[in-house]
Image (tube, coloured by chain):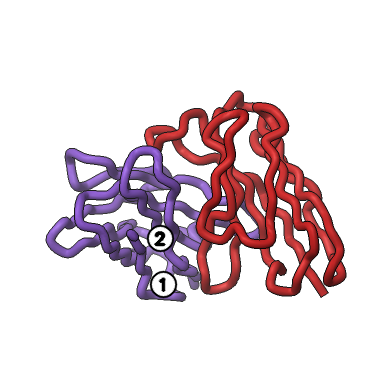
Chain colours: A purple, B red
Amino acid sequence: AQSVTQPDIHITVSEGASLELRCNYSYGATPYLFWYVQSPGQGLQLLLKYFSGDTLVQGIKGFEAEFKRSQSSFNLRKPSVHWSDAAEYFCAVAHSGNTPLVFGKGTRLSVIA
Amino acid sequence: NAGVTQTPKFQVLKTGQSMTLQCAQDMNHNSMYWYRQDPGMGLRLIYYSASEGTTDKGEVPNGYNVSRLNKREFSLRLESAAPSQTSVYFCASRIGDTHSSPLHFGNGTRLTVT
């Protein structure tokens, strides 16, 4: 079965600094990959997804992610973090188009002035 | 647009009590899902319904039952609540049953079982 690892439980960055959140998956073939964001007291919102094609995908709110097959990774990046980006971020994977998503345990992002 | 609506927002139960968590979507989506979220565990799928009239078990179905009442509504029932079911429950839906369409989440139901 596929699994998703987010190695960082909590990350703190300064406003305006760059951000990279790590995600590794275990699955033989290329899975469907997703990043979701959860603000406090809210449900999850899709930031971006990768199915195939260009390995650098752009999402909402200025986020991007890069699929690296050799590293089984799908890291999320943002060049300049805003205070409103403070939230919990979840990486998720599915091994085919109609199988349920498997979520990582999440990375909580704090932003300091 | 209301999107995905979950009721109640908060609930406290005693061990052994039963309750039903309600979920309704107004987006004409075919697929609906129930997840639970626990600290340090991420989201885990309890049950899902790929289309009206079908339901399937997810990763953690024990202790739960579901009903896809109609296309709009997908309820989650706890017949005999246990402290291990203390969690935040999220309902989600999407138009198809494949990942080409994004999941839309409700705002969650926070359940405490004492």
Q: Residue at x 52, y 53 (%)?
A: B58
Q: Dividing the image into 4 quarters, which one contains the C terminus of chain B?
A: bottom right
Query: As drawn, is A95 to the left or to the right of A60?
Result: left
Q: Residue at x 27, y 41 (%)?
A: A51
Depth check: give the residue in front, A84 or A39: A39
Where residue B83 appears, as percent x and y from the top left, is: 74, 74
Q: Do the residues indicated by labels 2 and 1 lie within the same chain of the protein?
A: yes
Disc 2 versus disc 1: distance between alpha carbons? Answer: 8 Å
Secondary structure category for the residue under label 2? loop
Q: Could you tell me the amino acid type at mark 1?
A: Val
Q: Is residue B95 shown above or below A69? A: above
Where residue B46 appears, as percent x and y from the top left, is: 58, 54
Q: Could you tell me the amino acid type at mark 2?
A: Val
Q: Chain of mark 2?
A: A
Q: Residue at x 43, y 56 (%)?
A: A102
Number of marks? 2
Q: Are marks 2 and 1 in contact (CB under 8 Å)?
A: yes
Secondary structure category for the residue under label 1? strand
- Judge the density around disc 1: few (<14), some (14-19), many (≥20) Cα neighbours within 10 Å: some
Where residue A14 appears, as percent x and y from the top left, is: 42, 71
Residue B88 is marked as: none
Q: Chain of mark 1?
A: A
Q: Quadrant of residue B33?
A: top right
Q: Quadrant of residue B109?
A: bottom right
Query: As drawn, is A48 to the left or to the right of A44?
Result: left
Residue labelled with disc 2: A81
Residue labelled with disc 1: A13
